Image: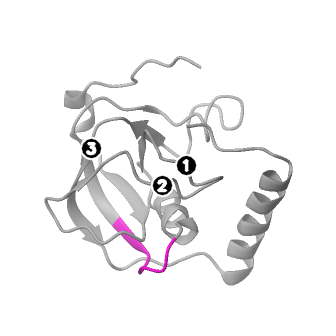
Amino acid sequence: MTSKPIADLDDTIAQRFYHGTRADVKPGGLIVPGYSSNYGKRKQASWVYLTGTLDAAIWGAELAAGDGRERIYIVEPTGPIEDDPNLTDQKFRGNPTQSYRTREPLRVTGEVTDWQGHSPERLKEMKDHLERLKAQGIEAID
């Protein structure tokens, strides 16, 4: 799949973006591609992901692999971003989750510390759904 960047850097500065994770990154630090993906076979990710909604970032933090504390960072892209094909196109037309990806680093500008996670029941539903997809051989798009 070939996709084109949805926005130039200047167009995205005014919007707030989030990144949910378990990684410990300080303000000013960078979130970069090249680490193991949180999903599927955990292969090396060539993209980093960001979202314009707090709810999607909460899912990212809750579903992230690892033992660290769930964190939601406020981030700004350092280069062009494009729609995340894992959550857009046929699945969610118009990108209602405002989910994006980039090959460039994300700069951490802050952390959201006061957020409410999903209920244990809802989280279990999502994890079960992801397990069913994995059993069917359906992987996230890199």
Residue kind at label 1, given as amino acid type: Lys
Position above or below: 75 against 72: above
Position above or below: 90 against 26: above
Depth check, front residue: 23 or 59 = 23
Query: In the displayed structure, does residue 43 sit left or right of residue 48?
Result: right
Under circle 1, the secondary element is loop
Q: Nearer the viewer, mark 2 or mark 3?
A: 2
Residue kind at label 2, given as amino acid type: Ser
Q: Earlier in the sequence, mark 2 or mark 3?
A: 2
Residue range (magenta): 66-72
Q: Residues within 10 Å of mark 3 (few under 14, many from 20)?
A: some
Q: Point out which mark residue 43 bears.
A: 1
Instruction: Residue at 49% x, 43% y: name it.
Output: 99
Taken as a whole, is the magenta stretch helix, strand or loop?
loop
Instruction: Residue at 72% x, 65% y: name it.
Output: 126
Instruction: Residue at 30% x, 29% y: name it.
Output: 80
Q: Distance of mark 2 from mark 1, alpha carbons?
A: 5 Å
- For residue 134, what is the image quadrant? bottom right
Are circles 1 and 3 on residues that touch, CB within 8 Å? no
Q: Distance of mark 2 from mark 3, alpha carbons?
A: 15 Å
Q: Distance of mark 1 from mark 3, alpha carbons?
A: 18 Å
Disc 2: which residue: 36
| The magenta stretch spans residue 92 | no
Q: Point out which mark residue 105 bears.
A: 3
Q: Residues within 10 Å of mark 1 (few under 14, many from 20)?
A: few
